[in-house]
Image (spheres, rainbow, N blue to C red):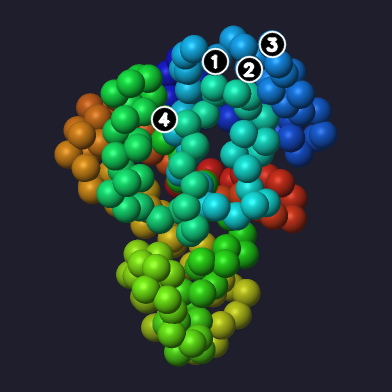
Amino acid sequence: MKALNILESLKAGNQRFIDGDSKIQALASPKRREAVADRQKPIAVILGCSDSRVPAEIVFDQGLGDLFVIRVAGNIVAPSQIGSIEFAIEQFGVELVVVLGHSNCGAVEVTIEDLLDLSESNSEYLEGIVSRIRPALKPLIEDHVKNDGSLKNRAVKANINASVRQLERGSEILARLVATEKLMIVGAEYSLDTGLVSFLD
Protein backbone atom coordinates (compact mmCIF):
# COMPACT_ATOMS: atom_id res chain seq x y z
CA MET A 1 0.00 0.00 0.00
CA LYS A 2 1.53 3.32 -1.05
CA ALA A 3 1.61 6.38 1.19
CA LEU A 4 -1.13 8.27 -0.68
CA ASN A 5 -3.47 5.27 -0.49
CA ILE A 6 -2.75 4.92 3.21
CA LEU A 7 -3.46 8.61 3.71
CA GLU A 8 -6.83 8.17 1.97
CA SER A 9 -7.55 5.17 4.22
CA LEU A 10 -6.87 7.29 7.32
CA LYS A 11 -9.12 10.07 6.00
CA ALA A 12 -11.91 7.55 5.37
CA GLY A 13 -11.46 6.14 8.86
CA ASN A 14 -11.68 9.62 10.35
CA GLN A 15 -14.91 10.21 8.44
CA ARG A 16 -16.37 6.96 9.83
CA PHE A 17 -15.39 8.16 13.31
CA ILE A 18 -17.09 11.53 12.76
CA ASP A 19 -20.21 9.83 11.35
CA GLY A 20 -20.45 7.43 14.30
CA ASP A 21 -19.94 4.48 11.95
CA SER A 22 -16.72 3.21 13.51
CA LYS A 23 -15.52 -0.35 13.01
CA ILE A 24 -13.32 -0.20 16.11
CA GLN A 25 -15.14 -3.02 17.93
CA ALA A 26 -14.29 -5.52 15.22
CA LEU A 27 -10.80 -4.07 14.80
CA ALA A 28 -10.04 -4.59 18.50
CA SER A 29 -11.87 -7.90 19.00
CA PRO A 30 -10.32 -10.97 20.65
CA LYS A 31 -10.05 -12.54 17.18
CA ARG A 32 -8.14 -9.51 15.89
CA ARG A 33 -5.92 -9.52 19.00
CA GLU A 34 -4.99 -13.15 18.37
CA ALA A 35 -4.31 -12.44 14.69
CA VAL A 36 -1.72 -9.76 15.47
CA ALA A 37 -0.23 -11.27 18.65
CA ASP A 38 2.78 -12.74 16.85
CA ARG A 39 3.37 -10.04 14.24
CA GLN A 40 2.49 -6.49 13.36
CA LYS A 41 2.36 -4.70 10.03
CA PRO A 42 1.36 -1.11 10.78
CA ILE A 43 0.34 0.97 7.78
CA ALA A 44 1.50 4.31 9.23
CA VAL A 45 3.37 5.97 12.06
CA ILE A 46 1.44 8.55 14.04
CA LEU A 47 3.48 11.01 16.11
CA GLY A 48 0.75 12.51 18.24
CA CYS A 49 0.17 14.46 21.41
CA SER A 50 -0.36 12.62 24.69
CA ASP A 51 -3.70 14.38 25.18
CA SER A 52 -6.24 11.82 26.42
CA ARG A 53 -8.87 13.13 23.99
CA VAL A 54 -6.88 12.24 20.86
CA PRO A 55 -6.30 8.46 20.67
CA ALA A 56 -5.04 7.90 17.13
CA GLU A 57 -6.54 4.44 16.63
CA ILE A 58 -10.03 5.68 17.49
CA VAL A 59 -9.72 8.98 15.60
CA PHE A 60 -8.68 7.14 12.42
CA ASP A 61 -10.92 4.10 13.07
CA GLN A 62 -7.99 1.69 12.91
CA GLY A 63 -7.49 -1.51 14.87
CA LEU A 64 -4.88 -3.45 16.72
CA GLY A 65 -1.70 -3.68 14.67
CA ASP A 66 -2.68 -0.97 12.17
CA LEU A 67 -0.82 2.08 13.51
CA PHE A 68 2.59 2.55 15.09
CA VAL A 69 1.75 5.31 17.57
CA ILE A 70 4.19 7.56 19.38
CA ARG A 71 2.62 9.97 21.85
CA VAL A 72 4.33 12.82 23.65
CA ALA A 73 3.01 16.13 24.98
CA GLY A 74 2.97 18.71 22.20
CA ASN A 75 3.80 16.11 19.51
CA ILE A 76 7.41 17.23 19.78
CA VAL A 77 10.37 15.69 18.01
CA ALA A 78 13.24 14.41 20.12
CA PRO A 79 15.86 11.70 19.46
CA SER A 80 13.68 8.93 20.89
CA GLN A 81 10.82 9.83 18.55
CA ILE A 82 13.13 9.87 15.53
CA GLY A 83 14.59 6.53 16.57
CA SER A 84 11.11 5.05 16.97
CA ILE A 85 10.13 6.20 13.49
CA GLU A 86 13.34 4.83 11.98
CA PHE A 87 12.60 1.53 13.76
CA ALA A 88 9.08 1.36 12.27
CA ILE A 89 10.41 2.05 8.80
CA GLU A 90 13.20 -0.51 9.06
CA GLN A 91 11.16 -3.25 10.72
CA PHE A 92 7.77 -2.81 9.07
CA GLY A 93 8.36 -0.89 5.84
CA VAL A 94 6.13 2.02 6.88
CA GLU A 95 5.85 4.67 4.15
CA LEU A 96 3.71 7.31 5.88
CA VAL A 97 4.33 9.38 9.00
CA VAL A 98 1.59 11.67 10.30
CA VAL A 99 2.38 14.35 12.89
CA LEU A 100 -0.98 14.68 14.64
CA GLY A 101 -1.51 17.83 16.68
CA HIS A 102 -4.83 19.09 17.97
CA SER A 103 -6.80 22.21 18.82
CA ASN A 104 -6.34 23.71 22.29
CA CYS A 105 -3.07 21.86 22.86
CA GLY A 106 -2.00 22.37 26.47
CA ALA A 107 1.72 22.11 25.70
CA VAL A 108 1.37 24.82 23.06
CA GLU A 109 -0.60 27.01 25.49
CA VAL A 110 2.08 26.58 28.19
CA THR A 111 4.70 27.62 25.63
CA ILE A 112 2.70 30.71 24.66
CA GLU A 113 2.40 31.67 28.32
CA ASP A 114 6.14 31.11 28.73
CA LEU A 115 6.93 33.37 25.76
CA LEU A 116 4.55 36.05 27.04
CA ASP A 117 6.09 35.79 30.53
CA LEU A 118 2.71 34.82 31.97
CA SER A 119 3.74 31.53 33.56
CA GLU A 120 5.65 30.44 36.59
CA SER A 121 8.94 28.78 35.79
CA ASN A 122 8.58 25.26 34.42
CA SER A 123 10.09 22.12 35.89
CA GLU A 124 13.21 20.99 34.07
CA TYR A 125 11.25 18.19 32.41
CA LEU A 126 8.38 20.38 31.24
CA GLU A 127 11.00 22.87 30.08
CA GLY A 128 12.37 20.08 27.88
CA ILE A 129 9.05 20.06 26.03
CA VAL A 130 8.56 23.85 25.99
CA SER A 131 12.08 24.40 24.67
CA ARG A 132 11.30 22.21 21.64
CA ILE A 133 8.06 24.11 20.87
CA ARG A 134 9.39 27.62 21.59
CA PRO A 135 11.32 28.21 18.30
CA ALA A 136 8.22 27.61 16.15
CA LEU A 137 6.08 29.95 18.24
CA LYS A 138 8.50 32.80 18.87
CA PRO A 139 7.89 34.54 15.49
CA LEU A 140 4.13 34.40 16.11
CA ILE A 141 4.50 35.97 19.55
CA GLU A 142 6.50 38.85 18.11
CA ASP A 143 3.54 39.60 15.78
CA HIS A 144 0.92 39.50 18.56
CA VAL A 145 0.55 41.66 21.63
CA LYS A 146 -1.96 39.45 23.39
CA ASN A 147 -2.77 35.79 23.85
CA ASP A 148 -5.97 35.44 21.80
CA GLY A 149 -7.73 32.59 20.00
CA SER A 150 -6.11 33.40 16.67
CA LEU A 151 -2.66 33.16 18.22
CA LYS A 152 -3.43 29.76 19.76
CA ASN A 153 -4.79 28.38 16.49
CA ARG A 154 -1.81 29.60 14.50
CA ALA A 155 0.58 28.33 17.18
CA VAL A 156 -0.85 24.79 17.02
CA LYS A 157 -0.35 24.70 13.24
CA ALA A 158 3.15 26.22 13.51
CA ASN A 159 4.13 23.56 16.04
CA ILE A 160 2.81 20.73 13.83
CA ASN A 161 4.66 22.11 10.80
CA ALA A 162 7.85 22.52 12.83
CA SER A 163 7.70 18.87 13.89
CA VAL A 164 7.23 17.80 10.25
CA ARG A 165 10.29 19.84 9.22
CA GLN A 166 12.34 18.44 12.12
CA LEU A 167 11.54 14.90 11.03
CA GLU A 168 12.35 15.68 7.40
CA ARG A 169 15.70 17.25 8.31
CA GLY A 170 16.64 15.74 11.67
CA SER A 171 17.59 12.31 10.42
CA GLU A 172 19.72 11.37 7.43
CA ILE A 173 17.66 8.21 7.02
CA LEU A 174 14.31 10.04 6.98
CA ALA A 175 15.66 12.85 4.78
CA ARG A 176 16.93 10.34 2.21
CA LEU A 177 13.65 8.42 2.16
CA VAL A 178 11.63 11.63 1.74
CA ALA A 179 13.95 12.85 -1.05
CA THR A 180 13.56 9.56 -2.93
CA GLU A 181 9.77 9.56 -2.36
CA LYS A 182 9.89 6.35 -0.33
CA LEU A 183 8.48 8.14 2.71
CA MET A 184 5.81 10.79 3.13
CA ILE A 185 5.68 12.94 6.27
CA VAL A 186 2.54 15.04 6.70
CA GLY A 187 1.09 17.25 9.39
CA ALA A 188 -2.50 17.06 10.59
CA GLU A 189 -4.66 18.81 13.17
CA TYR A 190 -7.46 17.13 15.08
CA SER A 191 -10.41 19.28 16.15
CA LEU A 192 -11.51 18.49 19.69
CA ASP A 193 -14.92 20.01 18.86
CA THR A 194 -15.77 18.24 15.62
CA GLY A 195 -13.52 15.15 15.54
CA LEU A 196 -12.27 16.15 12.08
CA VAL A 197 -8.61 15.62 11.19
CA SER A 198 -7.46 18.34 8.78
CA PHE A 199 -4.28 17.57 6.88
CA LEU A 200 -1.99 20.58 6.52
CA ASP A 201 -0.23 21.64 3.31
Rounded to the nearest angstrom, the CA distance separating label 1 from label 3 is 10 Å
Determine contact: label 2, label 1, CB under 8 Å.
yes
Which numbered circle lies on residue 31?
Answer: 3
Mark 4, other Cα within 10 Å: few <14 / some 14–19 / many ≥20 = many
Q: State the SS at label 3.
A: helix
* Residue that badge 4 annotates: 96
Left/right of residue 139 with respect to residue 169 in the rendered view: right
* Residue that badge 1 annotates: 37
Which amino acid type corresponds to the residue marked 3 in the rendered image?
Lys
Which amino acid type corresponds to the residue marked 4 in the rendered image?
Leu
Which amino acid type corresponds to the residue marked 1 in the rendered image?
Ala
Q: Quadrant of residue 174?
A: top left
In this rendering, the answer to whether 120 lies above or below 191 is below
Left/right of residue 154 with respect to residue 191 in the rendered view: left
Q: Which is more N-terminal, label 1 or label 4?
A: 1
Residue at (39% x, 24% y) in the render: 94
Rounded to the nearest angstrom, the CA distance separating label 2 from label 4 is 23 Å
Could you say which is closer to the camera, residue 13 or residue 181? 13
Rounded to the nearest angstrom, the CA distance separating label 4 from label 3 is 27 Å
Q: Which is more N-terminal, label 3 or label 4?
A: 3
